[in-house]
Image: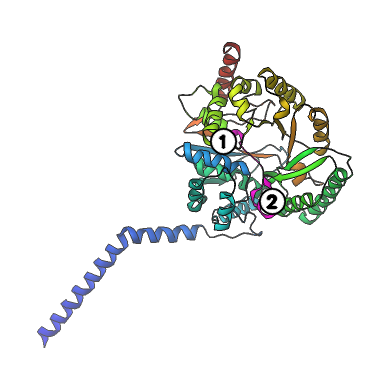
């Protein structure tokens, strides 16, 4: 009996040890480790928002993010970028509560995926290719790419680091989130929305009666809108009316363009020229425009062609915007400097190349309101095709001064990048030595490259 009990004891002990060893092995297996990491990640991504979710669709971004995104996917998918947030308002401070809500809203944004209906909509845009849509089917924002702290003079510091393919998509939703959280938590939002509606009604009255005649115009206000509700209200009302001397043609917000059956408007941004031209150590940055235009034509040919002129000054841009590109691109966009001087310069350039300016579009998008657009339209509409992209004036005109916030590319492939526009102070670079170097490169080219 004793012997039997001892055998039973050792058998149970052996089985127990085997189970423990098996359990430890299972815990160390890649699958189990992955499960634990996933569980930890899901736990860390627990979202506690005080406000309703602000970005509810991955289409809720500007059209040019998809224009550039496709070209990045096909030609520069290995590029890495750093994006940095900056608030230009000197009297604005983001409280810790606001910063926490911004974090939670960005987490919620990172939980979104494209729906099949959204992907089908993108695929039906004539210049978007199936290979890019297939990529978007798998794509998702990564909260791990963000670093959000209170370590800034304004109380909010945001950096996003990762592939250009990923981080480029974060800019517009992040800025929209910051705006809406700030105005909802720091002000009486209902009062702001009422003042917004009153001003919007007055704007629509003025173009409906012909007080302002601005020709073709689009809404470009997603990044600095008061709120999603305010922007949608503006787009809805503008699209329902007809105006003598004015025509509302679309919006940069792809989500709203889809919802209201409008044209999604947008081609390229400064990041395209900065990263393509300055993100390769073999390139002279003074030739950034040439590299960027060449890559764009490689992707789109004669489609989707409005060139941005002021990434490293318009004068330097014109060095590269010679007959081939001036013919292929349907027009050019103004985003800094005096719009009248810029427009006259572009007309003269087209004429010097033997191109009739009336076959090309001058798209103005810098700090516009209906009054400025009316003046520009009167001056240029008999000399070229004219169009306007109007942002904050449509999407965030209230009794309170709007935020002047940006999120810009500050590094590409470990190298500094910078914008030197036609308006001093609009650029953003963390390394002043690089800005001086870029200016020297541009100056040398302007003096010596005949």
Image: magenta residue range: 252-270
Relative height, residue 449 to residue 3 (above, below): above
Label at residue 1: none
Distance from label 1 to label 2 (Cα)? Answer: 22 Å
> Is residue 373 at all visible to an observer of this figure?
yes
Label 2 residue SS: helix
Q: Position of residue 411 (x, y in %)?
A: 52, 33
Residue 260 among magenta residues = yes
Label at residue 180: 2
Query: Which residue is at the front of the view, 148 or 402?
Result: 402
Q: Is residue 338 left or right of residue 289?
A: right
Q: How many marks?
A: 2
Check whether the beta carbons of the residues at disc 1 and disc 2 lie within 8 A of each other. no
Q: In percent of the image, x 71 and y 52: which residue is there?
A: 227
Q: Is residue 207 left or right of residue 55?
A: right
Relative height, residue 106 to residue 81 (above, below): below
Q: Position of residue 20 (x, y in %)?
A: 26, 68
Query: Which residue is at the front of the view, 402 or 20?
Result: 402
Q: Earlier in the sequence, mark 1 or mark 2?
A: 2
Label 1 residue SS: strand
Q: Residues within 10 Å of mark 2 (few under 14, many from 20)?
A: many
Q: In percent of the image, x 70 and y 49: which residue is there?
A: 262
Residue tagged 1: 409
Q: Quadrant of residue 400?
A: top right
Q: Position of residue 92 (x, y in %)?
A: 71, 42
């Amino acid at each position: 009996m004793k012997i039997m009990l001892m055998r039973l004891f050792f058998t149970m002990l052996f089985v127990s040890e085997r189970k423990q060893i098996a359990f430890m092995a299972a815990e160390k297996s890649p699958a189990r480790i992955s499960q634990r990491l996933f569980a930890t990640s899901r736990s860390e991504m627990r979202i506690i928002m005080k406000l309703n979710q602000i970005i509810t669709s991955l289409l809720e971004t500007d059209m040019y993010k998809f224009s550039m995104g496709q070209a990045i996917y096909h030609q520069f998918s290995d590029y890495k970028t750093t994006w940095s947030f900056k608030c230009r308002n000197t009297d604005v401070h983001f409280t810790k509560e606001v910063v926490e809500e911004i974090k939670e809203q960005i987490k919620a944004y990172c939980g979104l995926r494209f729906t099949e209906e959204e992907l089908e909509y993108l695929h039906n845009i004539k210049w978007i290719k199936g290979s890019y849509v297939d990529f978007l089917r798998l794509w998702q924002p990564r909260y791990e790419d963000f670093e959000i702290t209170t370590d800034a003079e304004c109380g909010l510091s945001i950096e996003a680091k990762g592939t250009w393919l990923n981080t480029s998509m974060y800019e517009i939703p992040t800025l929209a989130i910051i705006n809406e959280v700030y105005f909802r938590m720091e002000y009486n939002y209902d009062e702001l929305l009422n003042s917004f509606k009153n001003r919007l009604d007055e704007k629509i009255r003025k173009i409906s009666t012909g007080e302002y005649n601005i020709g073709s115009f689009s809404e470009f206000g997603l990044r600095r809108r008061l709120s999603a509700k305010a922007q949608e209200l503006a787009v809805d009302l503008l699209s329902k009316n007809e105006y003598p001397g004015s025509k509302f043609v679309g919006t940069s917000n792809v989500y709203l363009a889809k919802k209201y059956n409008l044209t999604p408007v947008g081609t390229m941004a400064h990041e395209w020229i900065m990263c393509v031209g300055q993100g390769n150590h073999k390139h002279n940055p003074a030739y950034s425009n040439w590299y960027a235009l060449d890559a764009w034509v490689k992707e789109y040919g004669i489609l989707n062609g409005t060139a941005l002129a002021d990434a490293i000054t318009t004068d330097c841009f014109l060095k590269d915007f010679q007959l081939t590109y001036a013919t292929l691109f349907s027009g050019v966009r103004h985003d800094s400097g005096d719009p009248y001087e810029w427009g006259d310069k572009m007309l003269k350039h087209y004429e010097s190349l033997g191109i009739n300016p009336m076959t090309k579009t001058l798209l103005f998008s810098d700090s516009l309101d209906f009054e400025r657009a009316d003046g520009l339209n009167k001056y240029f509409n008999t000399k070229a095709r004219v169009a306007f992209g109007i942002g904050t004036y449509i999407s965030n005109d209230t009794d309170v001064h709007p935020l002047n916030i940006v999120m810009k590319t500050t590094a590409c492939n470990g190298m500094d990048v910078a914008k030197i526009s036609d308006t001093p102070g609009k650029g953003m670079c963390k390394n002043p030595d690089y800005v001086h170097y870029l200016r020297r490169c541009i100056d040398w080219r302007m003096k010596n490259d005949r």
